[in-house]
Image (cartoon, helix red, strand yellow):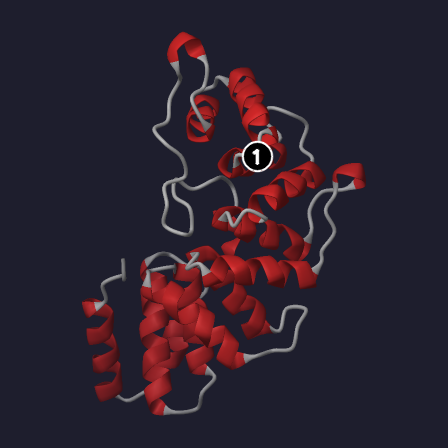
């Protein structure tokens, strides 16, 4: 899936727009102040202190800490990699409406991960459920992933309308994977106007180095006239990501 590169660690903001936690860092005496602080301690190499504090906070019901703890089990740097444990903690955070956890859990179920007792098996129904919940909150990566799921018919019936519905807001915010997917979807509509739009979205994804975007942009460019091409280039130059 195109969104895989965005699953490798927690962001600094929740998908519902609230800050992930309060001020990060260590409290007096070396104790970690909160989930965000524990994550910063982890990134600073204070692995044992970070894991201990995150686990305590997560067991106490803090959603951000549950999400971060899930990431530690997924990364396997502090504890043995265990995707089942990761999914359990992501699920606890997701059940509290944590958008990043909803997305990561959905993505984990999309293809499954791991092997043996620590494995999570693909479950496309659960994947779609959690991705939709995150996407509805405006989570860009979830919207992008959902667009690809619907656009390619990945385990569900292919639905171009749904694919475009989720690709458009993510692409407008500058997500390269969504821009590429939207270009692909527009390119399948056999009108000059849609091909011009496809060219623009492929070009924008290309400018971010997205794989395959340059090749697809070149193919579409050969199918449109000079006027349509010029308009597509102007749209590309004028593009400003939505905040």
Q: Residue furthest right?
A: 116
The quadrant of the picture occupied by the C terminus is: bottom left
In the image shown, does 213 or 145 lie closer to the viewer? 145
Q: Residue furthest front?
A: 60
Q: Is residue 37 left or right of residue 78?
A: left
Disc tally is 1
Q: Residue at x 54, y 39 (%)?
A: 67
**Percent x, y for residue 83?**
68, 40
In the image shown, does 61 or 150 lie closer to the viewer? 61
Q: Which residue matches tag 1?
A: 61
Q: Residue at x 64, y 57 (%)?
A: 110
**Percent x, y for residue 193?**
32, 88
In the image shown, does 230 or 56 lie closer to the viewer? 56
**Percent x, y for residue 88?**
67, 41
Q: Quadrant of residue 239?
A: bottom left
Q: Is residue 223 visible?
A: no
Q: Residue furthest top?
A: 29
The quadrant of the picture occupied by the N terminus is: bottom right
Q: Residue at x 45, y 87 (%)?
A: 189
Q: Quadrant of residue 220?
A: bottom left
Q: Is residue 160 visible?
A: yes
Q: Residue at x 41, y 52 (%)?
A: 16
Number of residues whose C-alpha sits closer than 10 Å to that of mark 1, classed few (under 14), some (14–19) or many (20 or more): some
Q: Is residue 147 left or right of residue 168?
A: right
Q: Is residue 187 above or below residue 236?
A: below
Judged from the image, the secondary structure of the residue bearing numbered disc 1 is: loop
**Percent x, y for residue 153?**
62, 73
């Amino acid at each position: 899936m195109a969104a895989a590169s965005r699953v490798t660690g927690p962001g600094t903001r929740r998908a519902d727009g609230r800050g992930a936690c309060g001020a990060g860092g260590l409290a007096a005496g070396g104790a970690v102040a909160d989930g965000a602080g524990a994550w910063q301690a982890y990134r600073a190499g204070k692995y044992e202190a970070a894991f201990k504090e995150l686990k305590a906070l997560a067991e106490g019901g803090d959603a951000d800490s549950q999400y971060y703890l899930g990431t530690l089990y997924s990364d396997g740097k502090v504890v043995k990699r265990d995707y089942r444990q990761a999914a359990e903690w992501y699920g606890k955070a997701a059940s509290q409406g944590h958008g990043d956890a909803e997305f990561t859990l959905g993505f984990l179920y999309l293809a499954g991960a791991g092997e043996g007792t620590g494995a999570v098996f693909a479950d496309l129904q659960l994947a779609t459920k959690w991705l939709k919940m995150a996407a509805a909150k405006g989570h860009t990566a979830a919207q992008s992933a959902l667009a690809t799921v619907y656009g390619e018919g990945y385990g569900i019936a292919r639905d171009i309308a749904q694919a475009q519905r989720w690709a458009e807001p993510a692409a407008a915010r500058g997500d390269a994977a969504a821009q590429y997917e939207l270009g692909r979807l527009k390119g399948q509509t056999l009108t000059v106007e849609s091909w011009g739009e496809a060219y623009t979205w492929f070009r924008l994804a290309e400018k971010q180095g997205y794989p395959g975007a340059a090749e697809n942009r070149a193919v579409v460019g050969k199918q449109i006239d000079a006027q349509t091409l010029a308009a597509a280039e102007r749209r590309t130059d004028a593009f400003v990501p939505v905040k």
